[in-house]
Image (spheres, grey):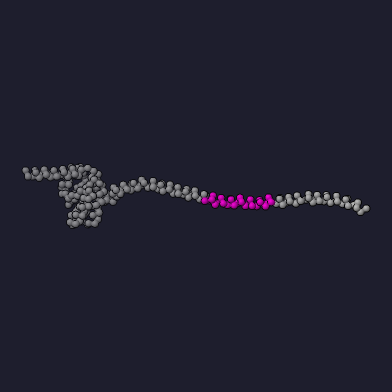
Amino acid sequence: MASEKILARKQEHIAELAESMSGDKTFVFVAARGLTVAQDTAMRKELREAGVTYKVIKNTTLKRVFEKLEVEGLDDIFEGPTAVAFCDEVTTAPKILCKYAEDIEVLQVKGGIVSGKAASIDEIVALSKIPTTEVLYSQVVYGLLFPLTKLAMLVKAVAEKKEEGGEAPAAKEETEAPAEAAAEEAPAEQEAPAEEAPAAEEAPAEEAPAEEAAAEEAPAEEPAEAPAES
């Protein structure tokens, strides 16, 4: 009777684990034996704050859980002490555990599960190198907005260039206007003496008839004096 109760508890525990691990989650399996209390505490804290569930579970129990979830190819992973970390986000658990594995020699990544299929150590490490969702989102947004930003800058530059080009001719017209006015005044000054010259020429012409009139009057006086001599 006691053994049946123990077996029932184990089955119930496996069912609960299978339910919590079901769905499209990413799993990372590690060998965590030999960590100091400080190292284990810091790692667990970071995993918890990132929304990652971390458990140290017996290999026999893990085998039954993933058999229930119909995931194959994990036999090599379930050798020696194993801890499992999992969450809905693809890169979070690989990033944190691979970072600690680089700094702590005794912590070793053993493999994982991605999209319901077994993943090798290299595949888990490759996932850890992928930027986070937030970074990827910002990169996508930047990639979409960059052409528009570049276009806006180009339009602004063209508009500024047009404004500069429009002011230059106006300044040129202003400088040309006084020059044209001076050019128009110069001929006027030159033409003034030309108009006065005929007036000077006409004055002698008017005096000439007066001299002719005197010349005509002079002979008229000479005949009047001739009889006085006889």
Q: Is residue 96 magenta?
A: no
Left or right: 21 in relation to 196: left
> Residue 29 placed where, x, y %?
21, 50
Magenta region, residue range:
171-196
Q: Nearer the viewer, residue 151 or 214?
A: 214
Q: Quadrant of residue 41?
A: bottom left
What residue is rendered at 58% in x and 52% in y?
179
Q: Is residue 112 left or right of residue 6?
A: right
Name the residue located 17 percent from the left edge and 50 percent from the top edge: 56
Q: Is residue 142 left or right of residue 102?
A: right
Let me know if residue 118 appears in the view: no
Q: Is residue 152 visible?
A: yes
Give the residue at x 7% y 45%: 2
Please tell me whether residue 174 belongs to the stretch shown in magenta: yes
The residue nearer to you, when weighing 40 against 117, is 40
Image quarter in which the N terminus is found: top left
In the image, is residue 43 above or below residue 18? below
In percent of width and height, residue 13 lies at: 14, 45
Q: Position of residue 17 (x, y in %)?
A: 17, 45
Q: Main secondary structure of the magenta part?
A: helix
Task: Pick out the residue farthest to the left.
Answer: 1
175 in relation to 8, above or below = below
Look at 20% across and 52% down and name the residue there.
44
Q: Nearer the viewer, residue 61 or 218?
A: 218
